Amino acid sequence: MGSLYLGCALCEVDADGNILLAEPTARALGLPAPDEPLFLSTHERDQCLVGYARSHLQEIQTRTERWRLADEDAGRDARLHQDRMRRLFGIVEVAPRNDHGLLLPAVMRHLGRIESVALVVGAGDRFEIWNPQLAVAHSDGRFRELASWQVTHRHAPRAGSRRARPVRR
């Protein structure tokens, strides 16, 4: 496994689509250095974005092959696999790191329904970017509780501050 993404941060998103992540927070989350690009795609089930390093592409390919074989064994329609492949490999954008944090391409911002605040959540070999209001409505009770606490108690930094709240463990 390549990168390991941990923790969470509630971050401001500026008008240009930058998720404003202070470098210590970005490092704590496991994001690579600013000169290393990240890839963003839509989550396979949830209404959020997923981000990962280039090194994770092989793992995604391995997983999708396992899913294809499981679908085939279960007699599921092959179009399900084709739709999954399109979501995972076709709906992908490079999200460059920059001095502000992470730049969300416009199409990803639209697909993830990201507005002025984003909840960045480590998810092991990838990370997720959520519209906090969608995270608060999630079916996973513990995740919903975490998101609700973040939104209620750890307000995103005020506009122009260019810092995120620190990751707490």
Image (cartoon, rainbow, N blue to C red):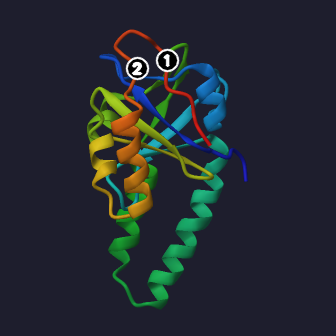
For label 2, count other residues whose C-alpha is less than 10 Å away and answer few (under 14), some (14-19) or many (20+).
some
Tell me, for residue 163, which label it has, or none: 1
Q: Pointers 1 and 2 in contact (CB under 8 A)?
A: yes
Looking at the picture, which amino acid does disc 2 mark?
Pro
Q: Position of residue 20 (x, y in %)?
A: 46, 21
Looking at the picture, which amino acid does disc 1 mark?
Arg
134 left or right of 86 in image = left
Task: State the image quarter where residue 99 is shown.
Answer: top right
Dot 1: element: loop
Q: Position of residue 82 (x, y in %)?
A: 38, 67
Q: Is residue 137 above or below residue 13?
A: below
Q: In front: 59, or 25?
A: 25
Q: Position of residue 124 (x, y in %)?
A: 62, 53
- Whole-angstrom CA distance, mark 1 to mark 2, is 7 Å
30 left or right of 17 in image = right
Q: In front: 53, or 12?
A: 12
Which residue is at a point 30% across and 16% down the rendered structure image? 15
Which residue is at a point 45% across and 82% down the rendered structure image? 71
Q: In front: 73, or 168?
A: 168
Image quadrant holding the N terminus, namely bottom right
Q: Is residue 138 visible?
A: yes
Which residue is identified by label 2? 157
